[in-house]
Image (tube, rainbow, N blue to C red):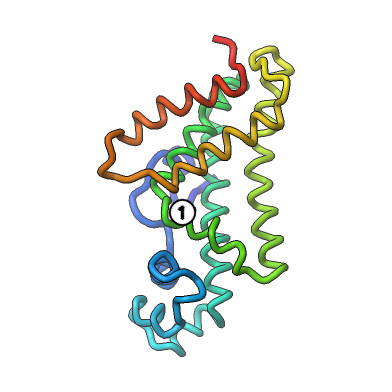
Amino acid sequence: MTVNGTAASSWREYTDQGLSKVLAAALAAFVEKGYDGASIREIASRAGLSVPGLYHHYPSKQALLVGLTNAVMRELLDRSRAAVAEAGPTPGERFDAVIESLLRFHMYRREQSFVASRETRSMELESRRAYIALRDEQQQLVDDIVRDGVTAGLFRTPFPEDASRAVVTMCVSVATWYREDGPLSPDEIVERYVVIARSTVGAVD
């Protein structure tokens, strides 16, 4: 498995934005002005392209939004799957790995995650459905691990689906407050939040 062209073993590594020049320009514009406030001309300028040149890559602003949100969700899924594949065989080990992956993604891909979440409302119906399907796939990955943990007697939560949604929501919310210059490093945040996630599913020590 690869993640943006890199080996699966690098799921913890974030060396760049993971976006093309055009999508990186769209991201910057959407973060600053929102989807509705950003113009194709501005995005083209940020990308160092003419408007016709940008249209060669993406035929509309909607296509840019879809390209960006799809890139975000596919990278998240690739990293989550790589983390689970590299973890040990027990549900507890796989749970810790996928939670760490979710946390790191929403720290290092904070802007991408924020825009994807906020601008879902701006997507056309079919594109929104496709995005939600990818988001559900990520949730299902965690759901399956939590159910496996309950079945194996390693997680004691009486509400596995609710607990799974709660920990994913917690991880996603990191994108709304994490700052590189904050009081905690990414490793410290991962350490604390994995403990919170284990508590939520009733992990047996």
Q: Quadrant of residue 20?
A: bottom left
The residue tagged 1 is: 5
* Residue for point 53% across, 39% down: 82
Q: Residues within 10 Å of mark 1 (few under 14, many from 20)?
A: few
Labels in figure, total: 1
Say left or right for 52 vs 136: left
Which quadrant holds the C terminus? Answer: top right
Image spot of residue 62 (x, y percent): 58, 75
Outermost residue toward the top? Answer: 205
Image spot of residue 104 (x, y percent): 43, 40
Which quadrant holds the N terminus? Answer: top right
* Residue for point 67% across, 71% down: 124
Image spot of residue 130 (x, y percent): 69, 60
Q: Secondary structure at mark 1?
A: loop
Image spot of residue 13 (x, y percent): 38, 42
Q: Is residue 171 above or below residue 114?
A: above
